[in-house]
Amino acid sequence: MAEAHCLIFPFPIQGHINPMLQFAKRLVHKGLRVTLILTRYLAKTSPFHSPTIAVETISNGLDDGEPHGFPVSSYLSLLKEHGMASLREALHRLIRCGRPATCIVYDPFITWVPELAGEYGIKTAAFFTQSCAVDYIYHRLYSGDLKIGEEEEKAIELPGLPPLLPADLPSFVTLPESYPSLRDMVTDQFKHIENVDWVFCNTLYELEKEVIDFMAEHAPVKAIGPTIPSMYLDRKLADDTDYGLSVFRPEARLCMDWLNRQEPGSVIYVSFGSLAKLSEAQTAELAHGLKRSKRPFLWVVRAAEQGKLPEGFAAEEVPGLVISWCPQLDVLAHDAVACFVTHCGWNSTLEALCLGVPMVGMPQWTDQTTNSKFVADVWGTGVRAVGDGGIVGRESIEKCIREVMEGEKGEEIRKNVSKWKELAVAAVSEGGSSDRNIDDFVSTLRRLAV
Ligand code: UDP
């Protein structure tokens, strides 16, 4: 009897690999054979070892180095040109070894996967790493039902979503001329959607009910998240396939030791993810805003961005720690952390929501604006800091931090966050909404493999 075998093919950036890798672990936990598809360059530069997940590498034509700032459209063309041929080779290799693929769970940025899988009779599942609300907006844009016209300040009404002002929409929608290739990339995700067997969203049904139901009219959408390792949601759910991320990096020890020395509920954690770049002026306002809040802070500033800090700041700020990377899940789960000043990347938003940390949203671009709208106005798990002329000033940052950490509003936000945390744990626990969707997927693959 053949064994069901699922390939997981993420787009090779951190915010996409993390959730798909966690999803892979969940499938392994359900007893499925899983292989991760990585580009050769990534496999070389960030070696991945797992006792339970195999790896197949493919070429993207840049095996010896990916030039910094390489245009996304050229990257996608190269990935198609070289990746298709080497994924084909990998599929043949797996057939020869007696482990043929039953399904490929792929990142929809890699649009050519369904066609290739179809040639081999392999099922496909598109795995969307953004919120269902954002996917739905992109889908409406793709279908031509979302027009951003002259009336710039008018709210957009879409079924299943609250009225959205242009400032709430993803920047690829409102500023197409600034990001033409990225706009194509997010709309092209839907090119082959009618040919895929499943559409997975890294969300939980309870969080985005209405929009999931509307999206389901266009595609076979299933919420399977949050893909946060179960051990962070509930210690009882941890097992040996479920381990944290990069806990052995030296920065991890440094910042966990620092957190251990802080009072419970006292620390502001600040991070803008793996890609966003703040201007020098915005970095300075944030530095002063943190200083004015008079609370200890842990601020992740990537090495390449540290030159933007006000002179002497990192050394002089005794109540704070500036670090180039941290194990974010461990930080958010630490009881010293009381507030997360975040760019509202979707992974960070879900992580804060699931670990019960109130947020101050400072969205920079892409879907972060939409996520911060939901955080502040729909889920009530934080506030959004609004800027003047694109820059959020120090007073506004200080005010937002106080709002989520103090007073009645802070109390309300903490209550909401606890509610969502409980619902997230329930969704991934046995019999929960996401868990059932994963079970259905696994049992269908098992039936197909017989
Ligand atoms: N992350 C981390 N440590 C850091 C910065 C980021 O562990 O110092 C992780 C974070 O937990 C999240 C991901 O990297 O899972 C960032 O994804 P997100 O969607 O929030 O933002 P992006 O980097 O895609 O803008």
Image (tube, grey):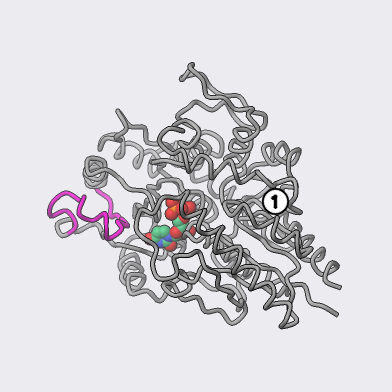
Residue kind at label 1, given as amino acid type: Val
Q: Quadrant of ligand 1?
A: bottom left
Visible in this render: residue 332? no
Q: Any magenta on residue 304?
A: yes
Residue that numbered label 1 is attached to:
199
- Where residue 115 appears, as percent x and y from the top left, is 70, 55
- Where residue 114 appears, as percent x and y from the top left, is 70, 55
Residue furthest top in the image:
151
Is 389 placed left or right of 175 in the picture?
A: left
Q: Any magenta on residue 132?
A: no
Examine the image and state in which quarter residue 52 appears: bottom right
Examine the image and state in which quarter residue 267 appears: bottom left
Which sits in the foreground, 168 or 234?
Answer: 168
Is 122 placed left or right of 47 in the picture?
A: right
- Where residue 301 appears, as percent x and y from the top left, is 29, 56
* Numbered range of the magenta stretch: 293-314
- Where residue 159 appears, as percent x and y from the top left, is 67, 29
Tell me the SS state at disc 1. Answer: strand
